[in-house]
Structure formats: C-alpha cells, structure tokens
Amino acid sequence: MIELDGTYGEGGGQMLRCALALSCLTRQPFRMTAVRQGRNDPGVKAQHVSAVRALLALSDATAEGVSLGAKTVTFRPAPIRGRTLSIDVETAGCLPLLLQALLLPCCFADDKIRLKLKGGTDVRWGPTLDFFRELVLPHYQALADIKLELVRRGFYPGGAGRIELTIRPRFSVPDDADWSRVAETVAREVSPLALDSSGTVHTIYGRSIASNELRAQEVAERQVRGAKAELKELGRTAKITKEYVDTKSIGTVITLWLSRGSNELPCISGSALGEKGKRAEIVGAEAASDLVRQITPAGGIDARLADQLLPLLALVGGSLTINAVTPHIQSSVYAINAFLPDRLKHDGCRLWTHPEQC
C-alpha cells in the first residue's frame, strides 16, 4: 500500500487526481491522508468524489473515504472496462480537473469508453474547457482515439455544463500486466515527449465565449477587443473567434493559446473569466496578460500544461522544460515518484524521465 502525505507541495486536490490515475495505470493501491489540507476548506470535494465513483463504476476497484470533507482516501485499483458512463458532479465542479483523474486510465481500458459528464466547464481555480481541448487532449491522442463533444457550457454557480468523450484505446493491456510491460509496449509505439517552448512565437489563437443573455451588450466581441488591444501594446496579434451559448448560469470566458519554436501543438495559454461588474474589455486584457506572462525569455511550456502532462510523461518518457516550478508541479512529481520510484527527475525548470525506470 503506497502512503501519500496530502500536505506535500500545494496541499490541494492535484495529488489525489494524479494518484488515482497512476494507481489505475500501475495497479498499485494507495492511502492518502490530509487530503487538501492546504486549502481553506480541506477534505474531499464533489469533483474528487465523482472521479473516484467513476473509476469504481468503470472497474472492480474499491475505495474508502469517498465522501465530502473526508480527510483520508484509500483506493484499490482494478482493470478499467469499456462502457458508457454518465457522471453528474451536481455542482459547478471543474470537469477538466475531473478528467485529469480519468483520462489516462480510460486510455488503457479493454474496450471503447464513452463518458457523459455534467458540471462546470469554465470555472475558477481550474483549467478552461478550451485549454483542455486545445492544449491537453492532443497529447493523449497517441494513446487512444479521443473525440470530445461540447454539448453545453457550464459556469458558476449553476454548472450544468455537458461534455461527452469517446475514448477508443490504441493498446490492449492484459488484466495481469504490470507497469514494466505496459511501459515497454507504449515505448515501442509512442514517441517520448520533448517540449521546451523556446524559439519563435507562432500565431496566437483564441476563443471568446459569453452567455446568450449578454449578446446585446456585445460582451464576446468586447472581450476580443480587450485581448487584441493588450496584445497590440506588446507587439503581438491574434486570431480570436467569438460565440454566444446557452447556459444555466450567466457567464463569460476567453482562452488564448499559441505554439512556439519547434512545437507543432500549442504549449502556452492564457485565460480569464468574466465577473459581474467587470468590463468585458478588462477580461480580455487579463487573458492576454496571462498569456504573455507565460512567454519567458528562457522558454519553457506553460506550467499549467505541464501539470496536466506529468502522468503522461511518466508513461511515455521524455522531457519537459517549464516556465516555472509551481507547488502543483511539486505535488505531482511527489505522487508519481511514489508509484514509480525515481521515475521523474528535475533540475530547475527541466523535468525528465529516468530511462532505467521505463
């Protein structure tokens, strides 16, 4: 039984999500104490309950402490089975964070999986749906054929956003397979990650979203103008689309992304959520400023992207150069190395896999 101290690093839910994914992949049980001890409202939250219940429904795994506010969680994994599963977080809980625990295990199911998720698509303290779709998901396509359908956006407090993921695994993993066999199989077929984000900044893209109720005020357009004005001040241009959508709770979001150097996939992002009383132009400018802050002279991919890719890095191997070592990153490295001793190494802002552990 692997023991994890939830106070390590940022002391949030990142470690639990990462541990669930790695536990399913390596078939090793774990117990995590002091869950989210570093937060003002410590303990298990709705999205974590949903993640564990989803993994239980997708397998014969067992768990203890799966309740709101629980400080200790014990999880014993089992092989993931292909099926259709509906998951309702019942709050505006962040669906992209929920998928951080589910996506990697589902890529190694014994058959196709279809996830129907309901909750928050674009909420505070979590990645936006467009960040997940444009920056994270493409990297997992090497493991499975993944299709994401956005049915409805979900903003705080009502949530009720809906997305559907269809995952067709590319690898067949026997029930009795151990980590080394899985890693060897994947290593023969999948190229290692090699992301550093140094070099020329390519075209900036973006998507500005607002609820239908805000159409008359041209909120989506004004977010675009605010972002472009901020980027122009910094000598950059962008191609940003706009869209009005039906939502339960009124809200707005703008997400920007870009690729850099030899990276064909986006590796830097910026985003902002609208708030009552905040001008749409300011929201757009905040997203642009967030993006530009991630473009450091020394290079390095967005640390928030690295946060989502570290479990994948542990599996396929390779290296990442990030623009900052965050407490989230520290929590993830700690959890991964608990399941795979010395698998991840880091020196400053560069992380890489230890070859002998492949």
Image (cartoon, helix red, strand yellow):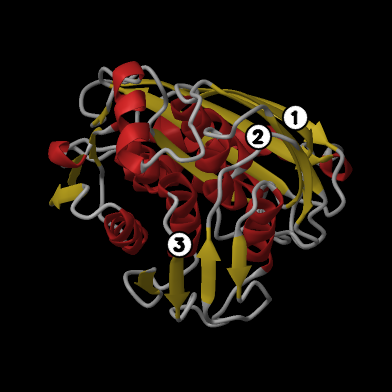
Furthest-front residue in view?
176
The crowd level at tag 1 (other Cα within 10 Å; few <14, some 14-19, many 20+) is some
* 75 to the left or right of 253: left
**Marks 1 and 3, Cα distance to the nearest angstrom?**
44 Å
Residue at 42% across, 56% down: 28
Q: Is residue 334 above or below residue 254?
A: below
Q: Look at mark 1 in the image and give the residue it sits on.
A: 243
Residue at 63% across, 60% down: 52
* 140 to the left or right of 58: left
Q: Is residue 328 above or below residue 272?
A: below
Which label lies toward us, 1 or 3?
3
Kindly check if marks 1 and 2 are in contact, taking CB atoms under 8 A apart as contact. Answer: yes
* Spot occupied by residue 351 in the image (x, y as percentages of width and height): 20, 44
**Marks 3 and 2, Cα distance to the nearest angstrom?**
42 Å
Q: Is residue 203 above or below residue 350?
A: above
Q: Is residue 150 above or below residue 304?
A: above
* Spot occupied by residue 241 in the image (x, y as percentages of width and height): 64, 24
Front position in the image: 40 or 178:
178
Amino acid at pointer 3 = Pro
Marking on residue 29: 3
**Residue 45 placement: quadrant:** bottom right
- Tell me the SS state at disc 2: strand
Marking on residue 208: 2
